[in-house]
């Protein structure tokens, strides 16, 4: 029987965590949980009383308070679609969040399989982030320079027209602040997971498919490992 896969992806903004999470979920039938996506959905929801406050925090490149973030993740992990496994993208982002996650997982009786760090050069990140955009319909990611769509007005993947969106925090000023936040608040969780013996590192500068292969290799160094499920058919 195949076992659920539960992992964390860590890396600075623009490392490709969202892209890898997406590829891995499609391939291995687990859900990706991105706290950034959850916050962006709250910003868009006119009925969310905290939407305006969260937007200001996102646009400043700062972290949303732990209390809100941790509760949101705890509720998300209780959803039935997490039973078969999950990939956390963007959480935890501070030592306090990592400690809260450890406690929460213990209480829920969940064991993490791996914590994967995607290493990238800081100076490449601003270029990567400031050119990126997404299809608002299917979520396919693009880049002005590295991955433009064949037809500039239509999504290669789902064909939707005029559906491309850019994140409001993907501008040079906010990106610099997000990078600073990563180094001062998020990078300290790396030694935390190293001490727990869970940290694996992959080269986030490699080609997209090569990064996926590296992640799969660190998850399951032995061929035939049952953490990796066969791709869904059809
Ligand atoms: P991301 O999509 O992961 O780049 O996240 C976008 C923004 O959402 C971040 O710059 C933060 O403002 C906020 N955010 C995402 N995850 C967290 C988290 N774990 N804790 C606090 N704020 C977060």
Image (cartoon, rainbow, N blue to C red):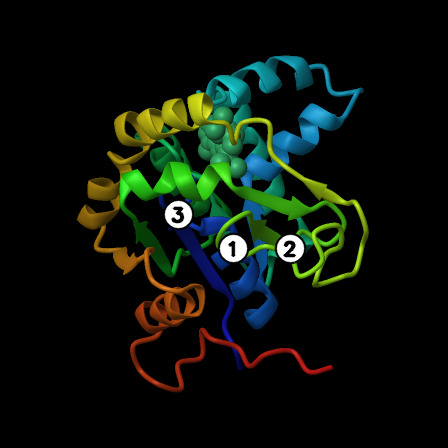
Task: Name the residue that disc number 1 marks.
Answer: 19
Q: Quadrant of residue 44?
A: top right
Q: Around disc 3, counting alpha carbons within 10 Å, would you say few (fewer than 14), some (14 to 19), or many (20 or more)?
A: many
Q: Nearer the viewer, residue 40 or 219?
A: 40
Q: Residue at point 70% right, 52% down?
A: 152
Where disc 1 sits, the SS reads helix
Q: Around disc 2, counting alpha carbons within 10 Å, would you say few (fewer than 14), some (14 to 19), or many (20 or more)?
A: some
Where disc 2 sits, the SS reads loop
Task: Name the residue that disc number 3 marks.
Answer: 15
CA–CA distance in space, label 3 to label 1: 9 Å
Labels 2 and 3 touching (C-beta < 8 A): no
Q: Quadrant of residue 185?
A: top left
Indicate which disc, 2 or 1, sits on the residue closer to the N terminus.
1
Q: Around disc 1, counting alpha carbons within 10 Å, would you say few (fewer than 14), some (14 to 19), or many (20 or more)?
A: some
Q: Residue at point 43% right, 28% down?
A: 175
Task: Name the residue that disc number 2 marks.
Answer: 140
């Amino acid at each position: 029987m195949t076992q659920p896969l539960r992992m964390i992806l860590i890396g600075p903004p623009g490392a490709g965590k969202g892209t890898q999470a997406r590829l891995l979920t499609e391939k291995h039938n687990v859900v990706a949980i991105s706290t950034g996506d959850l916050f962006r959905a709250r910003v868009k929801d006119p009925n969310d009383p905290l939407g305006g406050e969260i937007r200001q925090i996102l646009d400043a490149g700062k972290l949303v308070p732990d209390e809100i973030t941790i509760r949101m993740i705890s509720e998300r992990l209780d959803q039935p679609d997490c039973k078969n496994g999950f990939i956390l993208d963007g959480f935890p982002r501070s030592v306090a969040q990592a400690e809260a996650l450890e406690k929460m997982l213990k209480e829920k009786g969940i064991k993490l399989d791996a914590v994967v760090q995607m290493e990238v050069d800081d100076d490449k990140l601003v270029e990567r982030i400031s050119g990126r955009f997404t299809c608002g319909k299917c979520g396919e990611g693009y880049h002005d320079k590295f991955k433009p769509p064949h037809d500039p007005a239509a999504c290669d993947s789902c064909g939707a027209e005029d559906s491309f969106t850019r994140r409001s925090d993907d501008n040079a000023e906010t990106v610099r602040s997000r990078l600073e936040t990563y180094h001062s608040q998020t990078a300290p969780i790396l030694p935390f997971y190293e001490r727990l013996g869970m940290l694996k590192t992959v080269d986030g500068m490699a080609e997209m498919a090569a990064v996926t292969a590296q992640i799969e290799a660190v998850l399951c160094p032995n061929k035939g490992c049952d953490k990796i499920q066969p791709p869904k058919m059809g």
